[in-house]
Amino acid sequence: MKVDQVSKRLQAMAVSETLAMAQKSRELKSQGFDIIDLSLGEPDFNTPDHIKKAGIDAITQNFTHYPPVPGYLDLRQAIAVKMKRDSNLDFTPDQIVVSNGAKQSISNVLLSVVDPGDEVVIPAPYWVSYPEMVKMAEGTSVIVSAGIEVNFKINAEQLEAAITPKTRAFLFSSPSNPTGEIYTREELASLVSVFEKHPQILIISDEIYEYINYDGQHESIAQFESVRDRVAIINGVSKGYAMTGWRIGYLAGPLWLAKACQKLQGQYTSGASTIAQKASIAGLLGDQSVIGVMVSEFKNRRDLVVKRLAAIPGIRTNNPPGAFYVLPDVTAYFGKTDGKSVISNETDLVMFLLNEGHVALVSGAAFGAPGCIRISYAISQEIINQSIDRIEKALSLLK
Ligand code: PMP
Ligand code: GLU
């Protein structure tokens, strides 16, 4: 063994493609290239002032010591209030664990329940980090795919077919990153009817895009009484309150799971930033109209992106009702060339669009969505127009 040899566990893990693309576009920008970055999914809005002020007050008031491992009690109470207000779900503060972003909350849950060889069923397209987090827990991802023709949503038969005696958990996001699709109440009910037959499965419901829903009310799978006691809700303040850099996410779930996550977190982070926790309370309990302002702008941007993409020959897209992503199918461009290189797959196309069009996107391969590319439209309409002009021009070079 050599000193610079990293563990097999880490060797097996892929680098986050979303973060890698964002890094690549930062590097190109620093070299003087005029890159439009639509790779990273984060609101372009700044954190609202009343939330920032609560963070500043937290420093002034000396909330600068170690917090309780699962988070300050007043923050966990605020989350319980939010759960009741938005989803009519009852949680006590001891069922809630606050972490360094929803990303850590998901990892905490997986590390708490998955043993080597356990299976985690994940619908594809999935968020890039899910299978890698399962690998970290030494589990096996079982991928169930759904294409654009069914709006990227799996059905009950597919779910049933994927379940084995080794299935330990089901992990999904709705509204979804990367598809922007949302499971309706009826669709969730049909998945629930399958889970009712398999009581050993923990349902991990990533609801981080809850507020970014253009057509309706958020539906949580935890609202179904028959599975209520084995749903781990993952949420956070990153997307709804434009607080990605504050790094606050949380788990709300059964008490045994919250205790497990607390034990784990106690050994490897001691909890999340005190200042960010206090600011998050102001977000969760303060003026909620800040969300509506952002969401109505996201909706205008969704309409613009979908309209502009529909006018490009060979691009097929859904009309996503939430989140801030579209995942167009670009297979019509496979086999084409600009005379220099041939586009064989979605990753080639993303690199072509970066090099020729100077627009950074993410390959669908990272999300279990072959044939697709992901566009994050959390950016101004002016920049959306510029970027689609560039994409259109670059694609027109492919014959
Ligand atoms: N889940 C999904 C589906 C996401 O898109 C993100 C955003 N990166 C996260 C979880 C993690 O969010 P956070 O910033 O709270 O870690
Ligand atoms: N959720 C965002 C994305 O998918 C942020 C990047 C990340 O955390 O991976 O682009």
Image (cartoon, grey):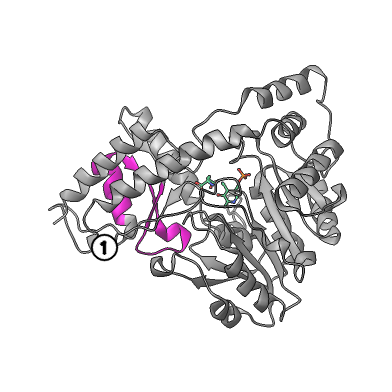
Q: Residues within 10 Å of mark 1 (few under 14, many from 20)?
A: some
Where the C terminus falls, by quadrant? bottom left
Q: Is residue 119 left or right of residue 317?
A: right
Pointer 1 residue: 344
Q: Position of residue 69 (x, y in %)?
A: 83, 43
In the image, residue 216 lies in the stretch drawn in magenta:
no
Q: Is residue 44 visible?
A: yes
- Farthest-out residue, top: 60
Q: Residue at x 40, y 65 (%)?
A: 148
- Farthest-out residue, front: 216
Q: Is residue 28 visible?
A: no
Query: Which residue is at the front of the view, 69 or 74?
Result: 74
Assign a secondary structure to mark 1.
loop
Q: Is residue 128 left or right of residue 261?
A: left
Query: Which residue is at the front of the view, 156 or 25?
Result: 156
Q: Position of residue 169 (x, y in %)?
A: 68, 69
Is 267 drawn above or below residue 282 in the view shown? below
Is 107 drawn above or below residue 280 in the view shown? below
**Bounds of the magenta segment:** 348-375
Q: Is residue 257 left or right of residue 196?
A: right
In the image, residue 365 lies in the stretch drawn in magenta:
yes
Q: Position of residue 187 (x, y in %)?
A: 57, 69
Q: Position of residue 86 (x, y in %)?
A: 70, 48
Query: Which residue is at the front of the view, 292 or 70?
Result: 292
Q: Residue at x 51, y 56 (%)?
A: 14
Query: Which residue is at the front of the view, 345 or 202?
Result: 202
Q: Residue at x 66, y 66 (%)?
A: 138
